[in-house]
Image (cartoon, helix red, strand yellow):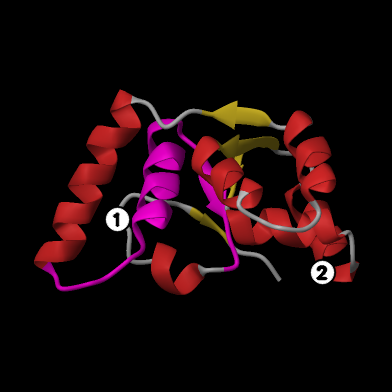
């Protein structure tokens, strides 16, 4: 069993409750599942399905973006910046939260997250 944090892209698919989201849920079942507070923020920005977002979030264990995550995020941002690689700030916050909480990250955005050193990704089909 592994600790797995869910990226916003994965949450959206699960909330839609269509075949892809059901498949993702099956792939990560058996793991301890967490939701980064930054992912919750992104989900709450939606204009639709807010009730479904609320029900989904109520079932999750929330990982706060705290001082340890902030420090890790600043290290990640500096490292990526020194390489000239751009990754969105919210994605950096989510990655840092996963790393400091010893979680792998389940995401559909492997292009950006794979650039972050020390972040373990859950490969989804």
Query: Residue 78: horizontal and vertical position, in percent?
Result: 14, 54
Q: Judge by depth and name the residue closer to the eye, 48 or 112.
A: 48
| Residue at (71% x, 32% y) in the render | 60
**Mark 1 lies on residue:** 117
Identify the residue at image location x=82%, y=69%: 20
From this view, report whether residue 98 is shown above or below residue 117.
above
**Mark 1 or 2, nearer chain start:** 2
Counting from the top left corner in percent of width and height, residue 45 is at: 60, 52
Crowdedness near tag 1: few (<14), some (14–19) or many (≥20) residues, C-alpha within 10 Å: few
Q: Residue furthest front?
A: 47
Question: Magenta segment, which residues?
Answer: 83-108
* x and y percentages locating residue 105 in the rendered image: 53, 50
Q: Is residue 10 left or right of residue 89?
A: right
Question: Marks 1 and 2, how far apart in space?
Answer: 28 Å
Residue 2 in sight in this render: no
Considering depth in this image, is 26 or 50 the residue closer to the camera?
50
Which quadrant holds residue 3?
top right
Q: Is residue 5 left or right of residue 47?
A: left
The vertical placement of 66 against 120, above or below, is: above
In front: 92, or 2?
A: 92
Disc 1 and disc 2 in contact, CB within 8 angstroms: no
Please check the rendered image and state whether residue 61 is part of the magenta-colored stretch, yes or no.
no
Give the residue drawn at x 26%, y 39%.
72
Task: Give the residue at mark 2.
Answer: 20
Which residue is painted at 19% across and 45% down in the image? 75
Q: How many marks?
A: 2
């Amino acid at each position: 069993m592994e600790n797995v944090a869910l990226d916003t892209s994965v949450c959206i698919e699960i909330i839609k409750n269509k075949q892809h989201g059901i498949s993702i849920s099956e792939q990560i079942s058996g793991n301890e599942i967490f939701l980064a507070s930054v992912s919750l923020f992104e989900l709450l920005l939606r204009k639709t399905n807010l009730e479904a977002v609320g029900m989904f979030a109520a079932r999750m264990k929330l990982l706060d973006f705290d001082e340890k995550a902030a420090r890790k995020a600043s290290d990640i941002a500096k490292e990526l910046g020194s390489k000239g690689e751009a990754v969105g700030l919210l994605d950096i916050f989510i990655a840092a939260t996963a790393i400091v909480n010893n979680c792998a990250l389940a995401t559909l955005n492997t292009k950006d997250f794979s650039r972050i050193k020390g972040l373990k990704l859950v490969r989804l089909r």
